[in-house]
Image (cartoon, rainbow, N blue to C red):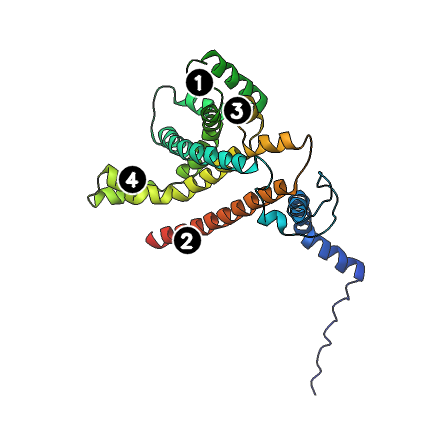
Amino acid sequence: MTTVAAIPRRARVGLAARSWRFVKRNALTAYALLVVGYLMLPIAVVILFSFNAPKGRFNYVWQGFTLDHWINWDSVLGIREAVITSIQVGLLATVVATALGTMIALAIVRHRFVGRSSTNLLVFLPMSTPEIVLGASLLTLFLNTSAIFQLGFWTIFIAHVMFIVSFIVVTVKARLIGFDRHLEEAAMDLGANEVTTFRKVTLPLIAPAMLAAALLGFALSIDDFVITYLNAGGTQTFPVFVWGAARVSVPPQVNVVASAIFLVAIALALGNVLWQYRSAKRTQGAT
């Protein structure tokens, strides 16, 4: 008759030990969620108060739900013109800065030339310089060349291109550093010239980075106040309009426009992430 050896039972883990293991496993996730919630809370308040129906001039206390401010978002005098100006400056400055920044990034990463290190350093200066210094310096430049530049739309455009281009260069350069040059070499081995290789291979692969840089540049442009205020003259962008209106009232339409800009930016960012994901899959399939 055979005997079966007794199998030792596993010691039961106490409640305190199980709780500590759960905390260790999920502490980082919980911390990240708390940080994201803290960052998103002001935006959630802005969106919430875009549906508020205040009885006074200041939209600070919740007094009732309404959709009227979304329907009549341009009922406040001057807000439509300010939003249109911000969008025009942002789009124009983003297009020009993206073109210039992409070419600068290609030159820095792909070529060796005299002054390359100095150029790389100069690219970072607008990013590290305080906005008040940039704005005051540009204002001095425009005032000293008042025969050429009159403060207004075009001085805002020049100022925005100047500080946006640095962010474009950094973003596109990060993509170019990890770029597989063998793809270009394979295209040229198959008979493509430099222009065709750039158009068919290089540009499609760096296009997601260019779009990400353009979205970042547009967000910086449409959000800027300090540099814009110092170089705007009599032209009003949306941030300048909000600053002027806040001294006498805070209409809910300001929250409406801010919420709309945020939601559009989120949609574009998600679309860009999806495009990058599909582009990466196509690249992996090609290799």
Q: Are marks 3 and 4 in contact (CB under 8 Å)?
A: no
What numbered label is drawn on residue 149? 1
Q: What whole-number distance in Å separates the C-alpha atoms at marks 3 and 1? A: 11 Å
Q: What whole-number distance in Å separates the C-alpha atoms at marks 2 and 1? A: 45 Å
Disc 1, SS: loop
Instruction: Give whichever of 107, 227 is nearer the camera.
Output: 227
Name the amino acid, label 4.
Answer: Phe
- x and y percentages locating residue 250 in the rendered image: 67, 37
The answer to whether one can see residue 78 in this image is yes
What numbered label is drawn on residue 232? 3
Name the amino acid, label 2.
Answer: Arg
Quarter where residue 247 is shown: top right
Disc 4, SS: helix
Q: Nearer the viewer, mark 2 or mark 1?
A: 1
Name the amino acid, label 1.
Answer: Phe
Q: Nearer the viewer, mark 3 or mark 2?
A: 3
Disc 2, SS: helix
Q: Are marks 3 and 1 in contact (CB under 8 Å)?
A: no
- Assess disc 4: are there few (<14), some (14-19) or many (≥20) residues with their C-alpha within 10 Å of its C-alpha: some
Q: What whole-number distance in Å separates the C-alpha atoms at marks 3 and 4? A: 39 Å
Read off the residue under disc 4. Answer: 198
Q: Would residue 67 appear left or right of 81 to someone viewing this image?
A: right
Q: Are marks 3 and 2 in contact (CB under 8 Å)?
A: no
Instruction: Give whichever of 134, 68 is nearer the camera.
Output: 68
Q: Residue at x 41, y 53 (%)?
A: 278
Q: What whole-number distance in Å separates the C-alpha atoms at marks 3 and 2? A: 41 Å
Q: Residue at x 34, y 25 (%)?
A: 112
Read off the residue under disc 2. Answer: 278
Q: What whole-number distance in Å separates the C-alpha atoms at marks 1 and 4? A: 37 Å
